[in-house]
Image (spheres, rainbow, N blue to C red):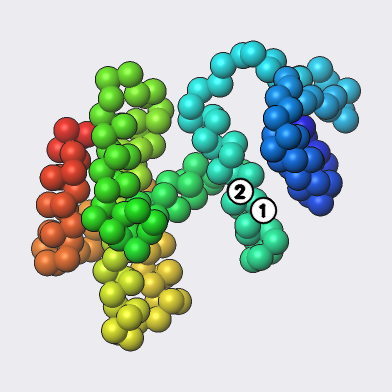
Amino acid sequence: LFLQVQRVGRAKDAMLIVDVVEVMAAQGIRGALIEADHFDGEDTRVDAHAPKPIEMQFLQGWTSFRHQLVTKHLNIIPEPDKKMQLAIYDLALMLGSRGSFANDKFQTLAEFIHELCHPECDYLVLLNGLKTVRAILYLQPDKDALALRLKKTDPKRVAERQELEYRKMEANAAPADAETQDRFFVTLQAQIARLGGVELV
């Protein structure tokens, strides 16, 4: 229902629906999936009991969250065909930073890699998870955070560098720091390998 209302440009009404569902859940009301007919007359309603792939569940939730964040605070609407790439980019920045919650020793990243190594992990989840771990090596969030603290760079240059490196990853080109064997890069590479990156590959 939230997604369908959102699609017709009623973002405020969609958020009210979220508030209502949260209140219902707090009161212990558990019902079937709320459905709404599409406005174009097509019967494409979702079967509440049909299982969804894990990747689809994550992508739908992440897309909704990102849409609310960027449209309300940055006035940016991501292109539809770039949604998964943006999700991978964001995850890499979060999981690759020891400044993220419960990740000061890369413990959240370690758990992420561990789940990807599970024998029953969905193939598409594994593929995009592997891309996320690769992206961490390209983006190196902690290196940029340190440079910002030491005032050796600025947020604009950090964003430009990270976007350039991410494009390199998408083109299967080597990271800039891999060619020079930058100490920070080599250390990060070793840390990811110890966390299970070798088994993941």
Look at 29% across and 84% down and name the residue there.
Answer: 150
Relative to 78, 40 lies left or right = right
Q: Quadrant of residue 177?
A: bottom left
Question: Considering only vertical position in the picture, is 187 above or below 25?
Answer: below
Q: Give the amino acid at mark 1.
A: Gln
Q: Give the amino acid at mark 2.
A: Phe
- SS for callout 2: helix
- Residue in the foreground of this view, choosing between 173 and 12: 12
- Residue in the foreground of this view, choosing between 19 and 113: 19
Look at 19% across and 48% down and name the residue there.
Answer: 192
Quadrant placement of the N terminus: top right
Outermost residue toward the bottom in this view: 151
Percent from the top left, x then y, of residue 10?
Answer: 83, 47
- In the rendering, which numbered label is found on residue 65? 2
Viewer can see residue 37:
yes
- Residue in the foreground of this view, choosing between 91 and 170: 91
Look at 38% across and 72% down and name the residue there.
Answer: 158
Quadrant placement of the C terminus: top left
Relative to 134, 89 lies left or right = right
Residue placed under numbered mark 1 in the picture: 68
Relative to 19, 53 lies left or right = left
Q: Are marks 1 and 2 in contact (CB under 8 Å)?
A: yes
How crowded is the residue under tag 2: few (<14 C-alpha within 10 Å), some, or many (20+)? few
Question: Considering only vertical position in the picture, is 194 above or below 57?
Answer: below
- SS for callout 1: helix
Percent from the top left, x then y, of residue 130?
Answer: 31, 38
Percent from the top left, x then y, of residue 23?
Answer: 75, 40
Question: Considering only vertical position in the picture, is 105 above or below 193?
Answer: below
Look at 88% across and 30% down and name the residue there.
Answer: 39
